[in-house]
Amino acid sequence: TRSRVSASEAYSGLGSAYGGGVFVYIGMTADYATISGNRAIARGSGNSAGGGVKQKASASAVTATNSIIDSNYAAKGGGISASKVHLVNCTVSGNSAAVAGGGFYTTFAGLFSSTIAFNSAAQTGGVRQTSANPDAFSAYSTIIARNTNTAPGGYADFYSGVPLSGQKNLVVSYNVASSAITITSDPQLAPLAFHGGPTRTHALLATSPAVDHGFGLALSWDQRGTGFPRASPVGSPDIGAYERHPNDDELFYSGFD
């Protein structure tokens, strides 16, 4: 809770390297946390996974609320590699993977009012999901956009073995059609910065299609916490981890700081 794991590295010269920042067998929870700038590096024939967080077993999940996972690196799952991922009001940004799943690589996931953006990988820079279970992946009011592939072809933002379930998500590049994806255009995100609260966020610009088009999840605040209410002004909340307010300063949110 309100912790920071940064600039750490898991390294192997011959075997595998897991969990540059955090390695857990069962599960973990993070609240108002920052997991940033960690790496999992394996030389030779070894594999590396979970630059920020690696979860080994499938009995539990990596659960994070009001947190940011950014600028981590591994071969698979630059930000997170886990059997199960559960994110509420979180930002996953600027992570990279040599193979797949720059943001995260997972079997099962549930995303709620989160932003997965500006991650990169050879295949699927944003989210790579590997299960054929029809209930394997759900997302509500979440942005998965502005991620990139470094190899030609493929799907930059989201690649899954099953259609995405949930409601009112903004996803630009994906491989399986889904009624849970209601917007496919650029979310118009400001650079990652402190816009209030203990963790950095991608603010929404005034003309973002994510504004007022989210799904009501009974969340009182956005990622920044107390003082940053959802559905402000009254109406539908915004899609993603950040809720735009009428007094947002466009000059500073455009990156001028």
Image: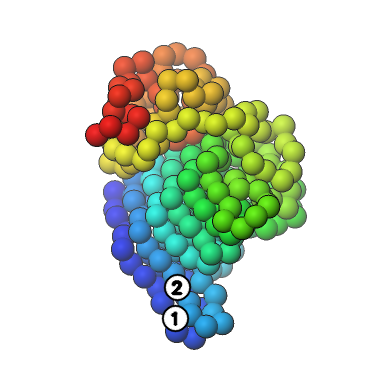
At mark 1, the secondary structure is strand
Residue 54, visible in the rendered structure: no
- N-terminal label among 1 and 2: 1
Is residue 114 shown left or right of residue 32? right
Q: Position of residue 144 (x, y in %)?
A: 56, 40
Q: Is residue 23 above or below residue 252?
A: below
Residues at marks 1 and 2 touching, judged by CB atoms closer than 8 Å = yes
Q: Position of residue 77 (x, y in %)?
A: 53, 60
Q: Position of residue 1 (x, y in %)?
A: 32, 50
Looking at the picture, which amino acid does disc 2 mark? Answer: Ile
CA gap, disc 1 and disc 2: 6 Å
Q: Which residue is mark 2?
A: 41
Looking at the picture, which amino acid does disc 1 mark? Answer: Ser
Residue positioned 40% across, 51% down in the render: 70
Q: Which residue is mark 1?
A: 12
Q: Quadrant of residue 129?
A: bottom right
